[in-house]
Image (cartoon, rainbow, N blue to C red):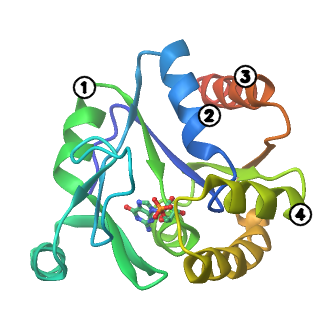
Amino acid sequence: MINQNGKLVLYSGSSGVGKGTILKKLKELDENVWVSVSNTTRGPRIGEIAGVDYNYITREEFEDLIAQDGYLEYAKYCDNYYGTPLAPLNEKLAEGKTVFLEIEIEGALQVMKQYPDILSIFIVPPSFEELERRLRSRATEDAETIEKRLEKAKEEIGCRGRYKYNVINDDLDKAVREVYEIIHRDDE
Ligand code: 5GP
């Protein structure tokens, strides 16, 4: 069960779509926004910080927390586990924060099933070609991983209709504004 004081926002979009960048800017605009830090079994990318971007843990540690019912949701994505730990999430919701869960679709669908009225936002790339260009130019993954992520992206974009709102990221500032308006519009 999750605390209902704050607002929970499901936030998805395929790899490379720029959803992390949008969130960074949104946090500057709205200090009530808190982004949940997930647990993952994948290793850190260059520039990522443990405890900020993710909690990097072993498969065994991940499975231990599953056994303790410690996740709101979790999923396997391209051979690694990713999950939302419940305890910090509830703490922030109790403080009245707007908590963003930046998660992939399988996990998001689990949460929608539990909480059908939840606010959900999907970030859409201007085109698949543009997404491919961004992913390849990011150069943080090897060729095989990029191919896997592109396949996954195709599948995920097909599910965008499951989300309450779709935001096209063709202009960063415009996308940030749109997300800001969505989370505040829902206050009414
Ligand atoms: P990346 O490896 O690019 O950081 O993340 C891969 C995918 O996993 C992204 O779509 C990201 O949103 C998703 N993800 C990150 N944390 C979680 C989580 O806690 N649960 C689920 N289901 N997906 C997550």
Residue 149 against residue 10 in the figure, above or below: below
Q: Earlier in the sequence, mark 2 or mark 3?
A: 2
Identify the amino acid type marked 3.
Arg
Q: CA distance from mark 3 to mark 1?
A: 24 Å
Q: Nearer the viewer, mark 4 or mark 3?
A: 4
What residue appears at the point 85 percent right and 39 percent down from the top-left corner?
170
Q: Residues within 10 Å of mark 2 (few under 14, many from 20)?
A: some
User: Where residue 126 sits: x, y (%)?
Assistant: 88, 50
Residue at figure coordinates x 74%, y 71% from the top left: 159
Pointer 2 residue: 22
Q: Position of residue 158 (x, y in %)?
A: 80, 74
Cα separation, mark 2 vs mark 3, equals: 9 Å
The residue shown at (55%, 14%) is 29
Answer yes or no: do the residues labelled 3 and 1 have beta carbons within 8 Å? Answer: no
Query: Looking at the rendering, which quadrant does residue 161 occupy?
Result: bottom right
Q: Nearer the viewer, residue 44 or 51?
A: 44
- Disc number placed over residue 129 in the picture, else none: 4
Tell me the distance, in whole angstroms, between the alpha carbons under discs 4 and 3. Answer: 24 Å
Give the amino acid at mark 4.
Glu
Q: Which residue is mark 1?
A: 95
Secondary structure of the residue carrying numbered label 1: loop
